[in-house]
Amino acid sequence: HRSVEIQWGSRSLLPISKPLFDIMCFDYMENSYNFSASIVITYYNELSVLLMRLLTTIKHRTPSKYVKEVVLINDNSSINITHEIYGYARDQDIPLVYLHNDKRLVIADSRRKGEMAASGNIIILLDSHMEVNDGWIEPLLHVLTLKPRALAVPLIHMSDESKYNEHSKTVVSPYYIRMKKGFGVFDFVETVGSASGRRWEMYPSSSLLGGAIAGRREVLRELYPGGVDPGGSWGFENNRLAFRAWLCGDGIWMCPCSQIFHPNGNDGTLQRYFPSPVAFNSLMGESVSEAINFMSEEKDKEILISKYTSDSHLSTIVRQKSQSIRNNFDPKEHKCKDYKSYYLKWVFENYLSWEKDEFLLVGEVQSVGAPGLCIEVSNNKLVAYSCRPHLTNAMDSHTMGFTKNRNIRLGNKESDCWDAADHGDKTVVIAYPCHLRSATEGTTLDTQWFEYRNSTQQIVHVPTNRCITVEDAKTVWLVRCGINDAKQKWTVKNCAWF
């Protein structure tokens, strides 16, 4: 403990900010939101230097108008750092509310206590060993403006503790938490995602990690699972909150422009935090307990219990836990939707399955103004290459698919869509993972809305009214539309209609 504190304490309390990874993130920072946040932080035997680093980044990387207070809960630590933290907050002019637990409550109930003491109209739950980045709070407030009963979640960078000031190479996003088919009980598999797959728009997530969560005060007070099953498995409160957010609220929305740094094990992964096989089975059982609380049909409950519990003893525990949950949180009182009919049929199948998009037309996109050139993708960018005279497969690398959801997908990789990389007058178009667009539809943040217009033969990015053009022989750009510009005119050949 002491050696680590010496190592970290020798560094600056305010590391260099990580730059915004996309210029589009400035759109959030330019807006003004009518919110003030209570930032709730629970700690137990935490190093004072880590708490001070977190407080410092909150102070210097958050507009003061958005910070009502920092609510700090000491979960009955045996290490006394209260005087040190109090003095530091006073010197830095950080509004601090300090709470002390007479006995250890663990994180869920400690956070619940902090939520009840908070006076801001937004509550943001943070781990005690984090750093927030420039522009971290505005995307969260943006989501909560559009979706009042949603939970907003930032992108969390993970890295080696010995490289605390460096850019991390691993990004954790709840989007990568897979779900078992059938009844969709959460499964902690492939949780660590690649940083190269990031995007800057908000998008829905099936679950969440507990390190950072934002919501309106009345929503978090209603949904957050405090006071039930103390000592439950690691991560259970997050699964429970995820179910409630979707079934009783507006869901969970990831905000990649909101970035937070979290030091982790020596390999920079989540491995240190994964539960043991025994704990994992318990976690799965507890998740089933929560899920069946939202199911109206007894036969569906029995199917789910038998699917995920291995013996009669565990099945009995699951039923008992479910009743305990219902005694503290009755879905009918909160006007929640049914787990099977809503979560599985709507959330899981529609929000979280991008492959549901339907093709209307698939073919080669050929230039009218530059005959013989067709659009392809090279190094994730749109380029113009010589057209292929004979296509043997309507869904190969030389074709593009125009869809019902007004995306243009790659014929050989349907999970990728054309994406307007930025708002410049002349910019490239990239191939990027397709995503739900309803949250940004009709705004300049909707980067994947493209339409082919028969009347003008143009391919238009609708929100910015810019058109695809070909210049310099093989360079494809997105520019201001011009009706008489032949290089902005395209036809779709070798078509397959659906």
Image (cartoon, rainbow, N blue to C red):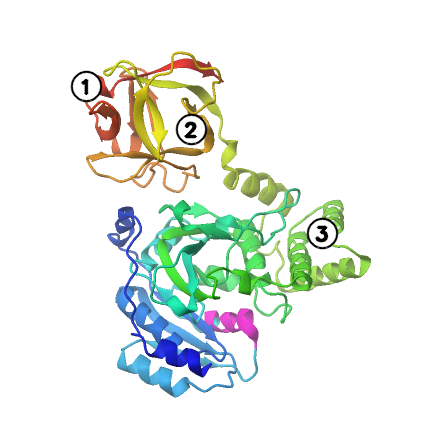
Characterize the magenta stretch by its predominant secondary structure.
helix
Identify which residue, 307 or 21, lies in the foreground. 21
The residues bearing labels 1 and 2 have C-alpha atoms spaced at a distance of 26 Å
Identify which residue, 33 or 375, lies in the foreground. 375
Q: Position of residue 99 (x, y in %)?
A: 45, 80
Query: Residue 426: in sight, yes or no?
Result: yes
Mark 2 residue type: Leu
Could you tell me which secondary element the residue under label 1 belongs to? Answer: loop
Which residue shows up at 80% across the image and 61% down it?
313
Mark 3 residue type: Tyr
Q: Residue beneath label 3, please?
A: 308
Identify which residue, 429 or 58, lies in the foreground. 429
Q: Quadrant of residue 197?
A: top left
Mark 1 residue type: Asp
The residues bearing labels 3 and 1 have C-alpha atoms spaced at a distance of 61 Å
What residue span does the magenta drawing correspond to? 105-115
Label 2 crowd (10 A; few <14 / some 14-19 / many >=20): many
